[in-house]
């Protein structure tokens, strides 16, 4: 069984008046509780794929099946209901949220919009969500701009899991965090995956992070899949030119110059 | 080795949201002439404040205490909002003061905001040479072209006339580096200069910086949040945390036998290609 199946997905943009393939005939699948990483250099199509999967933009060709339904054919109430099952966390939660909103407000929205909990029960739900991501329930009344970057990313994760999704798209979700905070957030994501069987589409430029958390990897180059397979196997012995270049460019503590 | 500059009891604080924030708390550090020194730390460690203080780029509203003393003849700290008292006392000759651009080259994280969007990049580089080396325009432009070749832009002739928006992030950072070294500075400061770039371009820019620093015999201050990246380039690493210098030492010592628990924690938090995957630690499996 697959949570997400992407088949022959293509998207062109125009750059300097010329069509330019951002995503070119890309296919992959993600199973329940599985993490698939998308890696590749800038402009390889990682974020375009994320936006296509989330239907923030529409593809020129291809098919997306989500939880067994033709996702691109959905509209109206069916699409809204399915969207609750497919969530996202971006790099910069400060840009994703109204900075003056309180944490409670940010978490109340999905509970209300998707009819997860009636008004009277929402404060308790919000407190439970905060605890689930390792935050004090008292944080609910603080404004988004007042809390730290790590706390904000935990709130973004709490918001994403509020609607009980089967898949979360994480687009460079850890890239702006300090390494000490990053480790804690990774542990949280793995814990949620184990407990709630959530699948992740994990977009990152950092092969070290990918190797630590992803089961499988897709390496993209110029919008096409250059290589795919078990994350550790691919990173240990990349077969494609771009995979080799990415591995060679990753800073390593065990290869310090004398 | 001889010292290039000697930082003594440097404190920097500024006001944010009506509160006094201490960015640096009595930092002591010597920078040797010709060395590659990395300053690493997490957000709020004070690493950028240190770089800005050395370059004299702190805002005038900052409170600065202690001293930054330039040990080379004819150099002293550039004037900041407030002159570092010690340095001023020791080097009263302001004519020979250290000038940002001429004696210090500074490369910022985001080349899009450090380059002028409406000026061809060749002219921006030439302007640095013209201002600090007293060259005419044609010689400055010729120097700009040489610099664009030195930073390995594929078509230096075309790049001279290009505007920043026509270049990729990596190409813009190459231009920013060319501008930073245009007047032949003794000290090059790279403040998270590769953090906005992807891994492959980051490695290329680090290679470029390493080569230019060697060719021009510059001293390098490499400011980074990434201890592994810093270790690939620097001979010494200084670790900052919450405005304190917790440890400074040879790269190999810092990485292999760190003295401070915080340095150990940073090394442990690094997820390298040799690290044990978290998936295994948690007992989860595919």
Image (tube, helix red, strand yellow):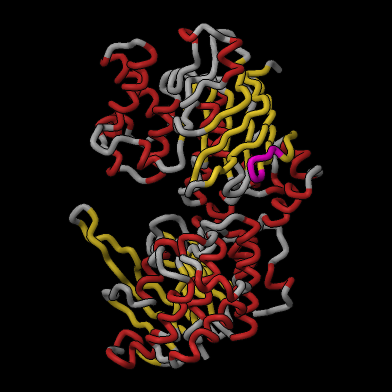
Q: Is residue B102 visible?
A: yes
Please name the residue shown 57% across and 49% down the image.
Answer: B43
Report the residue that reaches farthest toward the left: A17
> Horizontally, is B48 left or right of B34 in the view?
left
In which image quadrant can residue B169 be found? top left
Against B260, residue B121 (above or below) is above
Against A178, residue B1 (above or below) is above
Q: Is residue A5 visible?
A: no
> Horizontally, is B25 left or right of B57 in the view?
right
Taken as a whole, is the magenta stretch helix, strand or loop? strand
Viewer-side residue, B173 vs A1: B173
> Is residue B242 within the magenta segment?
yes
Per the rendered image, the range of residues in magenta is B241-245
Against B283, residue B114 (above or below) is above
Please name the residue shown 26% across and 16% down the image.
Answer: B137
Image spot of residue B87 (x, y percent): 59, 16
Please name the residue shown 58% across and 40% down the image.
Answer: B23
Please name the residue shown 29% across and 77% down the image.
Answer: A61
């Amino acid at each position: 069984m697959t949570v997400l199946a992407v088949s022959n997905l293509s998207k062109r943009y125009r750059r300097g008046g010329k069509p330019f393939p951002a995503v070119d005939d890309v296919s992959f699948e993600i199973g329940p509780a599985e993490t698939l990483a998308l890696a590749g250099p800038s402009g390889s199509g990682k974020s375009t794929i994320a936006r296509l999967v989330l239907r923030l933009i529409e593809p020129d060709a291809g098919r997306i099946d989500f939880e067994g339904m033709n996702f691109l054919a959905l509209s109206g109430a069916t699409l809204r209901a399915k969207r609750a099952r497919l969530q996202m966390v971006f790099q910069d939660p400060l840009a994703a949220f109204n900075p003056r909103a309180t944490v409670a407000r940010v978490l109340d929205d999905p509970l209300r919009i998707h009819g997860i909990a009636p008004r009277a029960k929402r404060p308790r739900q919000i407190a439970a969500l905060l605890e689930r991501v390792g935050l004090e329930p008292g944080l609910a009344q603080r404004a988004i701009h007042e809390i730290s970057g790590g706390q904000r990313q935990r709130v973004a994760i709490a918001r994403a899991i509020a609607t009980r999704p089967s898949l979360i798209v994480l687009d460079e979700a850890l890239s702006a965090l300090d390494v000490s905070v990053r480790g804690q957030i990774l542990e949280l994501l793995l814990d949620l995956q184990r407990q709630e069987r959530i699948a992740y589409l994990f977009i990152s430029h950092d092969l070290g992070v990918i190797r630590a958390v992803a089961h499988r990897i897709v390496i993209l180059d110029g919008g096409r899949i250059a290589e795919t397979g078990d994350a550790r196997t691919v990173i240990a012995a990349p077969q494609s030119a771009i995979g080799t270049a990415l591995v060679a460019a990753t800073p390593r503590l065990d290869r310090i110059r004398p | 080795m001889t010292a290039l500059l000697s930082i003594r009891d440097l404190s920097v604080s500024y006001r944010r949201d009506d509160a006094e924030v201490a960015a640096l708390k009595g930092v002591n550090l010597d920078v040797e002439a010709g060395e590659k020194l990395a300053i690493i730390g997490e957000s709020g460690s004070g690493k950028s404040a240190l770089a800005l203080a050395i370059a004299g780029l702190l805002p005038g509203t900052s409170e600065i205490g202690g001293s930054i003393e330039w040990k080379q003849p004819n150099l002293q700290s550039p004037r900041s909002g407030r002159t570092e008292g010690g340095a001023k006392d020791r080097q009263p000759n302001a004519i020979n003061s250290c000038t940002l651009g001429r004696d210090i080259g500074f490369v910022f994280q985001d080349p899009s905001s450090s380059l002028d969007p409406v000026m061809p990049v060749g002219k921006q580089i030439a302007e640095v040479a013209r201002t600090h080396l007293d060259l005419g325009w044609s010689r400055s432009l010729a120097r700009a072209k040489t610099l664009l070749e030195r930073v390995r832009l594929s078509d230096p002739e075309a790049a001279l006339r290009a505007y920043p928006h026509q270049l990729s992030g990596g190409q813009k950072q190459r231009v920013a580096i060319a501008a930073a070294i245009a007047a032949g500075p003794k000290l090059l400061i790279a403040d998270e200069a590769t953090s906005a770039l992807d891994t492959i371009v980051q490695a290329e820019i680090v290679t470029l910086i390493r080569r230019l620093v060697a060719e021009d015999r510059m001293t390098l201050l490499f400011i980074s949040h990434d201890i592994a990246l810093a270790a690939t380039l620097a001979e010494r690493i200084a670790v900052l945390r919450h405005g304190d210098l917790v440890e400074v030492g040879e790269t190999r010592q810092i990485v292999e036998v760190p003295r401070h628990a915080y340095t150990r924690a940073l090394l442990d938090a690094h997820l390298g290609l040799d690290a044990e995957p978290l998936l295994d630690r948690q007992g989860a499996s595919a």
